[in-house]
Amino acid sequence: MKNFLHYAQPSIDNEDKKNIERALFSGTLTAGDYLESFEDKLSKCCRSKYAIACSSGTMALHLLALALDVDKNTTVIVPSITFMASANAFKILGANIVLCDVDETSGLLSISALSRIISKVPKYNKIIVVVVHLGGRLVEIKKVKELVKNKGVIIEDACHAFGSYRIQNSLEKDFVGSCKYSIASTFSFHPTKTITSAPISASTIPQKGPGPNPANSIIFIPDNGPIRLTSQRLKFN
Ligand SMILES: Cc1ncc(COP(=O)(O)O)c(C=O)c1O
């Protein structure tokens, strides 16, 4: 009875144990080669340009909020069924959070409800739509993009959805994290999620480019090598 219904019980095998031991004795217990290799493998898995590791899915969302200069003139649209971090990561910077109804069958963001909300956002407000791929099920993000157009940006809260994909052209897999229609996707590797790493989570981010793009401020400042926003802002070391 003691082992009945664990809160989270990841499967950890001997290879995992060996890898942990290798990391422990590698000489670098923070950052270092393992972190770089993790980020590299993650971006390859998701087919994104970059991946950046951080301490939790909440932190990944919050870093994006900082990178996008979220403030009281930002409207963040969040589905009404999600984990509170999807909203709180933006709320803490003063954003105006608007909850969007979900589809009664899938529990995912309702496209028609989103359309009504977007039409009412004041013109001077920046819009961020946080699309949550609840329980690994994917929101129809192409439709969200068609609605948002260039009125705002989309962030995928893919904290539940590492490894989820859509089938494209009957063959190709379009993995969550590729950020085809969004400016970034966030993952959580908390022990209750599809895979776990204990304390690490991450964002994937597409190419740098014009417009609000976290790649311009979170990751690289060319010529100076990698600069992490985390160490540039007070309290986010
Ligand atoms: C939808 C969603 N977003 C974000 C998070 C935050 O992830 P973390 O627990 O790694 O901070 C969670 C965590 O459960 C979540 O369910």
Image (spheres, rainbow, N blue to C red):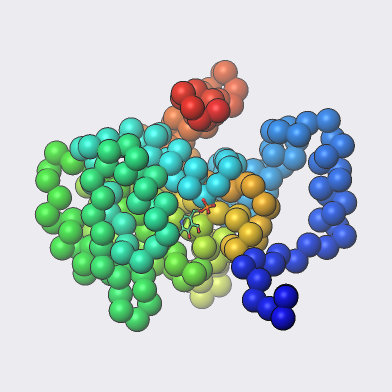
Image quadrant containing the N terminus: bottom right
Q: Is residue 153 left or right of residue 85?
A: left
Farthest residue, direction top: 224
User: How far from the left and from the top, in percent, is residue 20?
Assistant: 81, 48
> In terms of image quadrants, where is residue 106?
bottom left
Q: Is residue 9 above or below residue 27?
A: below
Viewer-nearest residue: 229 or 49? 229
Nearer to the camera, 235 or 36: 235
Quadrant into which the C terminus falls: top right
Quick check: can you spot residue 58?
A: yes
Whether residue 225 sits left or right of residue 108 in the image: it is right
| Total number of numbered discs in the rendering | 0
Q: Residue at x 45, y 38 (%)?
A: 63
Name the foreground residue: 1 vs 158.
Answer: 1
When the figure is inspected, residue 88 is found, relative to residue 109, above or below; the finding is above
Residue located farthest toward the front when viewing the structure as drawn: 2
Taking the image as drawn, is residue 211 in sight? Answer: no
Query: Residue 131: where, in percent of width, then height?
Result: 37, 58
Considering only vertical position in the picture, is 224 above or below 75?
above
Where residue 202 appears, as percent x and y from the top left, is: 56, 46
Is residue 21 toward the left or the right of residue 123 in the image?
right
The image quadrant that residue 17 belongs to is bottom right
Say which residue appears at 12% left-offset and 54% top-offset.
120
> Which residue is found at the position 55% from the left and 54% from the top?
188
Identify the residue shown where x is 71% and y is 33%: 30
In screen coordinates, is 170 left or right of 225? left
Q: Position of residue 55 (x, y in %)?
A: 58, 42
